[in-house]
Image: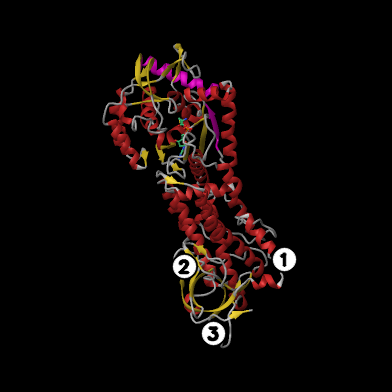
Amino acid sequence: MEKVFYITTPIYYVNAEPHLGHAYTTVVADFLARWHRLDGYQTFFLTGTDEHGETVFRAAERAGEDPKAFVDRVSERFRRAWELLGIAYDDFIRTTEERHKKVVQYVLQKVYEAGDIYYGEYEGLYCVSCERFYTEKELVEGLCPIHGRPVERRKEGNYFFRMEKYREWLLGYLEDHPDLIRPEGYRNEVLAMLAEPIGDLSISRPKARVPWGIPLPWDEDHVTYVWFDALLNYVSALGYPEGERFKTFWPHAWHLIGKDILKPHAVFWPTMLKAAGIPMYRHLNVGGFLLGPDGRKMSKTLGNVVDPFSLAERYGRDAVRYYLLREIPYGQDTPVSEAALRTRYQADLADDLGNLVQRTRAMLFRFAEGRIPKPVAGEELAQGTELAGRLRGLVRELKFHLALEEVMAYVKALNRYINEKRPWELYKEDKEAAQAVLYRVVEGLRIASILLTPAMPEKMAELRRALGLKEAARLEEAETWGLAEPLPLPEEAPVLFPKEAKASKESEEKMEQIGIEDFAKVELRVAEVVAAEKHPNADKLLVLRLSLGKEERTVVSGIAQWYRPEELVGKKVVLVANLKPAKLRGIESQGMILAAQEGEALALVTVEGEVPPGAVVK
Ligand code: ME8
């Protein structure tokens, strides 16, 4: 198989600031590009901006700006946005560029000469925001189905592309290529569209009404309809018709779009390609909508957008990328919110992954002289080397959320492995055995960090530096056990996913001296553990039932790494009894029990002797 990969995003309209919806599609594209590069594919990743058409023209008017100055400015916002999210595109195309205009006019002329374009009169219902006419049937309660705005009845002289002529051909092509449009639900939608006549496509606008566009080569009084112009970006950027890039990459094209622009990509574009004698793209991948807090499609018009940059600023760009890829099953509509991002950040990134790196580093300094211990033969941990193969399959099927879930499950398994092996105890009897445990954990982290690099390129590079590992160069390195070299770790390494700044401020305040009256505010009581079990939603937590004599309490405690539930029953512990209750992963904790901790070691504070449960500790 030829290892070549071409990935595109929609080119975004420059009438609105980039929001999390645009960011999502672009992050998916960047993930796929990085994944394929890492897997040895010759890769080309294209994004850009769609700068012609009526909507953009009107937006410039509203802003009181010359259209060119306006599109220059907003297009730059998109570039800047992608920079902030770590998007490594190979090319950024703008439809106002000469290289693009040239190709649009070339294709128009070609199709015109072939007899597939004719002049006629169009009358229909038009949504200015969508830049398109709708049929009566497509409207929702008489309004535009995307924007919920009234449509206008319009009549004008247009040039038409003979799209209907290619309908049967397209149906046949879809039948022969069942994986052309994915996920399958969207393929079925397109088949349904093609079951009835699709009509011809109006591909021009009178210049008198819309002066902002590419003039038709044979009639200067008309400009090209924005979709006929925009879709061609996918080939103009490759230097169609003669460019080397076009020859290399076009046969391997994957388009990524949102479901709002399914028809232009699944009906207009293939018939345009056919008429122009250009081979078909390889895949059309259709994403669902990100929904705002109101449950509706996130869009500027609806005013429910989440700003990706403020999220990136506060949580880091890689956390935003991870959240989008991990949370959203590709193709499905999914609600997104900062609260959900925060939960993922804390549970997956800070508690599982970040904490694993930190404790591994701490133990390497304590038990292995601050370097990766010598490789131990065989004994690979939990089949880490099989992950890459499984992930390849999941990525090919667009199941990014499951791919990341697999790696994160592996990270959890590494944490559990440490808890079970207890290197801090092992070290006392058998130094080499403790170091072998640590070596396996480092190897596991090396593998996980390669697989997570396309999602979190910056953080994974940081993770590898923190452990003295070289940069991730090839996906195959995740398929071989034992590649970590015995190198020293850097003395200092930043915390990978810091808890929010607020938490660290609180711990600083703890160092202040307090008066006896402050201490008296804390009500400490002896409590007997009457029952204990694992928390259903968190590996690190136990749920304890405590007796205070006259009453019982439920307390959630982060001691699962150190205590098995059954060994706790009957112990008398010390409870902070007047602590405000707090929900921990869905279970309310009515107080907190005391424990002593230093690094990896932890012991509960217990009470000896004959004091009854409920007794005050002071
Ligand atoms: O349609 N959820 O540009 P556009 C998910 N210029 N994805 C979303 C989204 C949301 N709430 N909002 C936007 C255009 N998107 C044309 C494209 S291509 C030749 C021309 C993403 O600025 C999604 O990918 O309206 C959608 O298809 C795209 O932004 C639309 O961007």
N-terminal of the pair, mark 2 or mark 1, is: 1
Q: For the residues marked 1 and 3, what is the alpha-carbon distance in whole angstroms?
A: 33 Å
- Rendered residue at 72%/70% (across/down): 515
What element does badge 1 sit on?
Answer: loop
Percent coordinates x, y for residue 12 in the rendering: 50, 32
Quadrant location of the C terminus in the rendered image? bottom right
N-terminal of the pair, mark 1 or mark 3, is: 1
Q: For the residues marked 2 and 3, what is the alpha-carbon distance in whole angstroms?
A: 27 Å
The residue nearer to you, when weighing 430 against 606, is 606
Q: Residue reaching furthest bottom?
A: 610
Looking at numbered disc 3 in the image, what kind of residue is underneath it?
Pro
Look at discs 2 and 3 and give the one toward the viewer: 3
Number of the label disc, if any, that sits on residue 612: 3
Looking at numbered disc 2 in the image, what kind of residue is underneath it?
His
The residue nearer to you, when weighing 548 against 52, is 548
Look at discs 1 and 3 and give the one toward the viewer: 3
In the image, the segment drawn in magenta is 89-118
N-terminal of the pair, mark 2 or mark 3, is: 2
Residue 456: in sight, yes or no? no
Percent coordinates x, y for residue 27 in the rendering: 51, 42
Number of the label disc, if any, that sits on residue 122: none
- Rendered residue at 58%/87% (across/down): 609
Above or below — where is 616 with respect to 591? below
- Rendered residue at 49%/19% (across/down): 213
Q: Is mark 1 within 8 Å of ligand 1?
A: no
Residue 592: in sight, yes or no? yes
Q: Quadrant of residue 97?
A: top right
User: Could you tell whether 15 is left or right of 330 in the image?
Assistant: right
Residue linked to disc 2: 535
Residue linked to disc 1: 512
User: Could you tell whether 114 is left or right of 429 in the image?
Assistant: left
